[in-house]
Image (tube, rainbow, N blue to C red):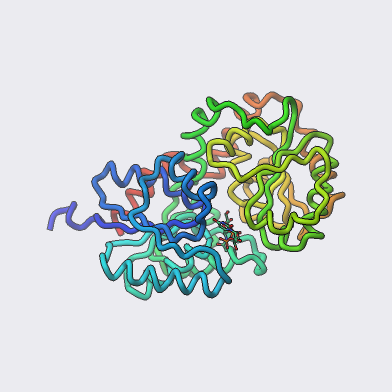
Amino acid sequence: MNERDRLARIITTVIGARPQFVKCSLLGRELRRRGIDERLVHTGQHYNPELSEVFIRELEIPAPDVNLGIGSDSHARQTARMMIALEAELEGRRPDAVIVFGDTNSTLAAALVAVKMQIQLVHIEAGMRGYNRRLPEEHNRIVADHLADVLICHNERAAERLRQEFVSGRIAICGDTMRETAEYFLPRALKRSMLAAVPEGRFALLTAHRPDNVDDPKILAGILEGAGRIGMPVVFPVHPRTRKSLAGIAVPPGVILMEPVGYLDMLGLLARSELVLTDSGGLQKEALFIGTPCVTLRGETEWPETIETGMNVLTSNPPTANEIVAAAREMSTQTGESRPQRRVRLAPLIDERFGPIDVARRVADTVEKC
Ligand code: UD1
């Protein structure tokens, strides 16, 4: 058997929710470049075009080979239905390895099915912990990490966390896939004209979709109140989950609601906003990579590196209006430098904390050796 015969050539990649499209884009391109047969399976967890198709198109991801069409449901029903459909999918074509990303219910379902079918499981973005057991993402990432045969970490700290938890899989440090994707697509995002709803001059960007922040209209109203008092207009692309709780809430003047935006418009908004207020994990990182200060609308983060750079600050669970105003003020004191100057200053800090930059190549090297 020669060296090439021993390499994994048949891969199934499972995606399903917005952040996973971001994470699979450049890796898929690298796998195809190497002649690896990647079958892309979309669970259908996100199905609104603005959460799914727009991302797939903008990130140059080929149309998924199959969409399982699972859609929204309770955690147990959604995960169980994904598992049943994924088992049938993997029985039809036994790949050398299954790749999963991050911490959504699609990640959990695919991880459980792959391990039970004794197919090598690769977990990308392994070793993250927020240490808040209320979040479904925390359960999903712990389970995926402990089931995975190959754990792809962005840095040594994530790897060390996994060693301390005695995971049984092989750990590889490959850098941060979202960073590589943001750097690759940023020039394209900046060429697009700004969305019509975005005001002239200084503005901040708000996103909120975590159940603990948005399912209770009183908590969501507090977040909007805080956003309305930070002293500049706030642009708020609204996740469908959040839209449901907005009915009956008085949105402060200056908070501009809009439909969810695609990947390129989100990068463009991040790059032009003074400040981002968010409960998303991915956006905390993307803000840092682009040089925008961030207020995290949670009491903890799975990305402590963003805090250490001085570019992100936490609030509480749930965040109050006063805390948001104080945190926004704290982060605004940073604005003594231009964004290019800030990006130059941050570059070595980001390199140190987010590992190597040729991420897709490193991950593909590791996947091939599954
Ligand atoms: C999911 C992930 C979360 C990730 C987020 C990115 C889990 C547990 N959560 O959260 O980690 O940060 O995606 O956006 O996997 N909905 C629609 N259209 C859609 C999808 C969802 O209207 O295309 C609505 C439905 O009412 C649904 C709700 O949003 O019940 C929540 O969707 P779900 O996929 O369960 O979780 P997200 O909140 O999107």
Write the residue at 66% across / 55% down: 209
Q: Residue furthest front?
A: 247
Q: Quadrant of the C terminus?
A: bottom left
Q: Can the viewer see residue 141 in this picture?
A: no
Pinpoint residue 316: horizontal percent, then vertical percent.
78, 57
Write the residue at 69% across / 58% down: 244
Q: Nearer the viewer, residue 128 or 254?
A: 254
Hey, which quadrant is residue 201 in on the image? top right
Instruction: Answer above or below: position of 358 versus 3.
Output: above
- 319 relative position to 147: left or right: right
Pinpoint residue 222: horizontal percent, then vertical percent.
82, 54
Q: Residue furthest left?
A: 1
Q: Quadrant of the N terminus?
A: bottom left
Q: Nearer the viewer, residue 232 or 137?
A: 232
Write the residue at 39% across / 70% down: 85
Write the residue at 72% across / 33% down: 274
- 178 relative position to 331: left or right: left
Pinpoint residue 152: horizontal percent, then vertical percent.
44, 55
The image quadrant in which ligand 1 is located: bottom right
- 16 relative position to 40: left or right: right
Instruction: Answer above or below: position of 322 versus 89.
Output: above
Pinpoint residue 261: horizontal percent, then vertical percent.
59, 42
